[in-house]
Amino acid sequence: MLIIGLGTAFALLTFIVKGPVGYSAGVLSDWLRARPRALAGVYTSSGAVLVGLGVKLAFERRE
């Protein structure tokens, strides 16, 4: 009986935390789709971050 209560509490708390995150992601997605320039900026900045991380990784020294 205890395990059912813990499982239910976990499911409820997960829904309370992740529900608003999912809703906010949907709202942000709609906002970005309506503004192609903002979406291009997100693509450019995320690409620059990935290239920067790749360069950092390429110059890492192994011990």
Image (cartoon, rainbow, N blue to C red):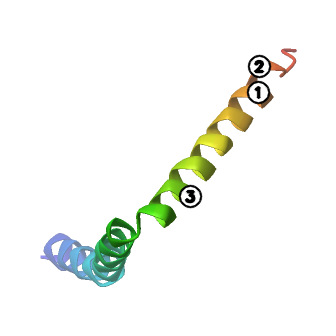
Tell me where residue 11 sits by quadrant: bottom left
The residue singled out by tag 1 in the image is 55
Along the line of sight, the residue nearer the viewer: 48 or 7:
48
Kind of residue at badge 2: Ala
State the image coordinates of residue 61 (x, y, percent, origin top left).
Answer: 87, 18
CA gap, disc 1 to disc 2? 5 Å
The reply to whether the C-beta atoms of the residues labelled 3 and 1 are less than 8 Å apart is no
Q: Earlier in the sequence, mark 3 or mark 2?
A: 3
Along the line of sight, the residue nearer the viewer: 58 or 48:
48
The residue singled out by tag 2 in the image is 58
Label 2 environment density (alpha carbons within 10 Å; few <14, some 14–19, many ≥20):
few
Tell me where residue 4 sits by quadrant: bottom left
CA gap, disc 3 to disc 1? 21 Å
Kind of residue at badge 1: Val
The quarter of the picture where the C terminus appears is top right
Q: What element carries label 2?
A: helix
Q: What element carries label 3?
A: helix
Query: Horizontal placement of 55 versus 51: left or right?
Result: right
The residue singled out by tag 3 in the image is 41
In the depicted structure, whether residue 19 falls above or below residue 49:
below
Label 1 environment density (alpha carbons within 10 Å; few <14, some 14–19, many ≥20):
few
State the image coordinates of residue 52 (x, y, percent, origin top left).
Answer: 73, 36
Query: Horizontal placement of 59 versus 33: left or right?
Result: right
The reply to whether the C-beta atoms of the residues labelled 1 and 2 are less than 8 Å apart is yes
State the image coordinates of residue 13 (x, y, percent, origin top left).
Answer: 31, 81
In the depicted structure, whether residue 37 falls above or below residue 22:
above
Along the line of sight, the residue nearer the viewer: 33 or 13:
33
Tell me where residue 57 sits by quadrant: top right
The quarter of the picture where the N terminus appears is bottom left
